Image: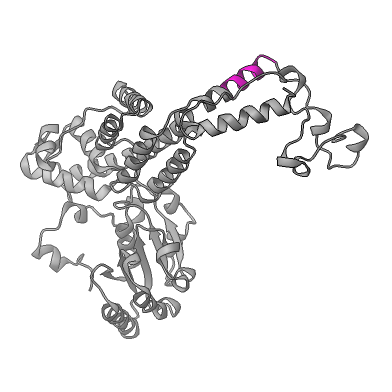
């Protein structure tokens, strides 16, 4: 179907604030600076008359539809939007046929925007190929999922892939402030208290569309928008949480200590507080990755695998779905057996190095691959462990100054117990005990 952005539709039905505030030019777009600079592919698309195809990949509310509309508006091309949630092959072919007819009769090009394109099956995506290959349309596909997994290769190879990033707090704040003052928005008919603005930014979670939806709901209740008005409009209490202040440090401290104390319920509570307050989920994920080695370590090595996987998942899908991944990692970390042997081991080793206990690398361990190394005695006498039973051979590995130092002292907790048994035997064998 054709875009809803024509004047007749605008007069017939009041449009949502998020639609009214869509930028009309690239210069009005807030965020995505890496895509909008001089000479970028998106700029070239706007400045060129030649059709091209591209995919916009990014979290919800980052401006995928906005950018497609701006391209259409600036280049004076007809804008046709299809939702992959409800459209089928018949709709795709009809849109392409109309675009070809328009191009042949008037010379006017069409921007064919397919939202949620990853929801199209193979047959539906195949239907787009002729239009993309023959450049009957400027095709723009929007997706929140990795297109390398959800889009067929022939379509992806003929298109440019642009990755959008979550909006920063400053970006969302700028979007809201513009909406309050711009005649297309509230036109200064309402005032937004600073604390209410901060709350809306937190609630948005980097989603500009969500922030404008919440602002519009609040403006329907009162002209003087306070935190209490926003809470009533959105039906969500403001979490008193300053990401630069004491609450930030107190809550993350309690979060870590709850996992360390194996209280999964308490840890989930603090996780929920951080998420609801708008804390960056990537920050939370980084703290969990650190915890997995610092407080669990070899007692459950799979804990680090889970934490890293969750950090990648959160980076890929964002919130709100990412909270499920975070919760899984929190429960795993909280319920895992605990060991701080890893952090103590590296701490002791670093402390010795800082105190000057370094010494010379034993000659037989030195690099011997370059010409002349043999004359210096490098590698002379080195015993290759794989040539010996059990892959072990007694020889000196550490510098003389730290030869008797013990850094890794495993616990008997969880999976570290058999590691402790093995390490004791290996250490005794290597040191001739």
Picture residue at 72% right of the left edge, 41% below the top: 391
Q: Where is residue 358 in the image (x, y as percent from the top left)?
A: 72, 20
From the viewer's perspective, is 190 left or right of 161?
left
User: Which residue is at the front of the view, 229 or 19?
Assistant: 229
Q: Is the magenta stretch mostly helix, strand or loop?
A: helix
Vertical placement of residue 10 versus 345, above or below: below
Is residue 166 visible in the rendered structure shown here?
yes
Residue toward you, 103 or 308 = 308
Decide if residue 384 is on the left or right side of residue 45: right
**The N terminus appears in which quarter of the rendering?**
bottom left
Q: Which residue is drawn at 34% across and 62% down?
A: 142
User: Which x, y percent locates residue 113?
Assistant: 32, 68
**Quarter of the image holding residue 116?**
bottom left
Residue at screen point 67% across, 30% down:
426
Which corner quadrant holds the C terminus? top right
Q: Nearer the viewer, residue 383 or 106?
A: 383
Residue 189 appears in view: no
Magenta highlight range: 346-356
Q: Is residue 324 left or right of residue 299?
A: left
């Amino acid at each position: 179907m054709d875009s809803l952005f024509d004047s007749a539709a605008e007069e017939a039905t009041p449009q949502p604030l998020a639609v009214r505030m869509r930028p009309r030019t690239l210069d009005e777009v807030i965020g995505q600076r890496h895509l909008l600079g001089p000479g970028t592919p998106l700029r070239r698309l706007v400045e060129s008359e030649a059709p091209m195809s591209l995919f916009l990949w990014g979290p919800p509310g980052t401006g995928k539809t906005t950018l497609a509309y701006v391209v259409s508006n600036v280049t004076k091309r007809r804008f046709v939007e299809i939702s992959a949630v409800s459209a089928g092959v018949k709709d795709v072919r009809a849109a392409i046929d109309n675009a070809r007819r328009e191009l042949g009769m008037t010379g006017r090009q069409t921007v064919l925007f397919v939202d949620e394109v990853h929801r199209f099956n193979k047959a539906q995506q195949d239907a787009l190929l002729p239009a993309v290959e023959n450049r009957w349309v400027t095709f723009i596909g929007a997706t929140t999922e990795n297109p390398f997994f959800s889009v067929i290769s022939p379509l992806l190879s003929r298109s440019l892939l642009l990755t959008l990033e979550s909006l920063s707090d400053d970006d969302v704040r700028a979007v809201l402030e513009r909406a309050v003052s711009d005649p297309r928005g509230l036109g200064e008919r309402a005032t937004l208290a600073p604390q209410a603005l901060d709350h809306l930014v937190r609630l948005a979670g980097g989603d500009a569309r969500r922030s404008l939806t919440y602002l519009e709901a609040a403006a329907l209740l009162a002209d003087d928008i306070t935190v209490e008005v926003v809470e009533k409009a959105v039906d969500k209490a403001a979490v008193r949480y300053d990401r630069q202040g004491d609450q930030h440090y107190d809550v993350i401290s309690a979060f870590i200590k709850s996992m360390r104390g194996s209280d999964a319920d308490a840890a989930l509570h603090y996780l929920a507080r951080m998420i609801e307050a708008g804390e960056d989920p990537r920050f939370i994920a980084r703290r969990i990755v650190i915890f997995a080695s610092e407080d669990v370590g070899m007692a459950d090595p799979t804990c680090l695998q889970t934490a890293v996987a969750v950090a990648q998942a959160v980076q890929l899908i964002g919130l709100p779905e990412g909270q499920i991944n975070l919760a899984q990692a929190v429960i795993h970390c909280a319920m895992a057996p605990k060991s701080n042997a890893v952090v103590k081991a590296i701490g002791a080793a670093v402390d010795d190095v800082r105190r000057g206990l370094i010494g010379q690398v034993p000659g037989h361990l030195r690099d011997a691959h370059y010409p002349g190394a043999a004359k210096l005695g490098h590698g002379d006498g080195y015993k290759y462990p794989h040539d010996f039973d059990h892959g072990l051979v007694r020889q000196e590995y550490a510098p003389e100054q730290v030869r008797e130092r013990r850094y890794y002292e495993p616990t008997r907790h969880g999976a570290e117990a058999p590691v402790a048994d093995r390490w004791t035997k290996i250490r005794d064998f290597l040191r001739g005990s």
